[in-house]
Image: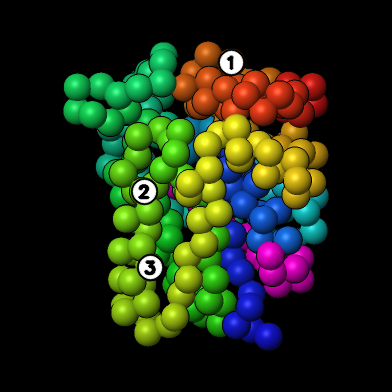
Amino acid sequence: MTDQRALVLLSGGQDSTTCLFWAIDHFGKNAVATLTFDYGQQHRIELDAARRIAAYAGVGNTILPIDTFAALGGNSLLDSSIPVPVSVGTDASGLPNTFVPGRNLVFLTYAAAYAWQRDIRHLVAGVAQTDYSGYPDCREETILALQRCLQLGMERNFRIHTPLMHRSKRETVQLAVSLGALGALGMSHSCYNGKRPPCGSCPACQLRAKGFAEAGIEDPLLTA
Ligand code: ZN
């Protein structure tokens, strides 16, 4: 039934990997496909992680190139001359320099366009407004407004699923364990410095470590 197929936005990170396993549990493996964006991120390791995780989970993966964000500049994930912040938190503007303005909006719009062509109605994204990195495009209000916009703009009854929206990092780890996603998390990548094994000190590593510590689970990435 085409109406019950789902497209997971898979970055190769912890949250989208957990969402992939949520989608497999919810829709069934044969109904799930994944989409990964090559948006010029410095750390190509993310793309490798996404490919490996999709293969491990037994679902298809498409990598879609978008080279516009790097051209816009001003971001530490895209520009090696801008240092990654050393701690979790925000600068004077209220947003960390790892924020890529419009990223989730564009990703979800491309994902919807990709899904539209394939008669897929369900989109799954690993955004969360609890324990998040301070990105306004991860908030539920933004996602609901965008869902409405995509429904109107493409005349398709899209549903954006955000299973992590109200989960803390601890709860996200617990969800991953219950879904049998730990093996895949060992292949996932979170570190803003592109290190494997992870640097352990950047905000992404800190947030990830906090979730695993609070859940009382050893991060399989650290023992991989
Ligand atoms: Zn790191």
Tell me if the residue at label 1 has its CB under 8 Å from ligand 1. Answer: yes
Q: Residues within 10 Å of mark 3 (few under 14, many from 20)?
A: many
Give the answer, above or below, for where 144 lies relative to 117. Answer: above
Label 3 sits on residue = 147
Q: Quadrant of the C terminus?
A: top right
Q: Quick one: label 2, few (<14), some, or many (20+) residues within 10 Å?
A: some
The residue that label 1 is drawn on is 200
- Helix, strand or loop status at disc 2: loop
Q: Is residue 166 visible?
A: yes
Q: Is residue 119 left or right of residue 141?
A: right
Q: Quadrant of residue 82?
A: top left
On the image, the x and y values in percent for residue 57 come to 78, 54
The residue range painted magenta reads 26-39
Q: CA distance from mark 3 to mark 1?
A: 35 Å
Distance between the alpha carbons at the discs numbered 3 and 2:
12 Å
Query: Quick check: is the Cβ at mark 3 less than 8 Å away from ligand 1?
Result: no
Q: Residue at x 66, y 36 (%)?
A: 173
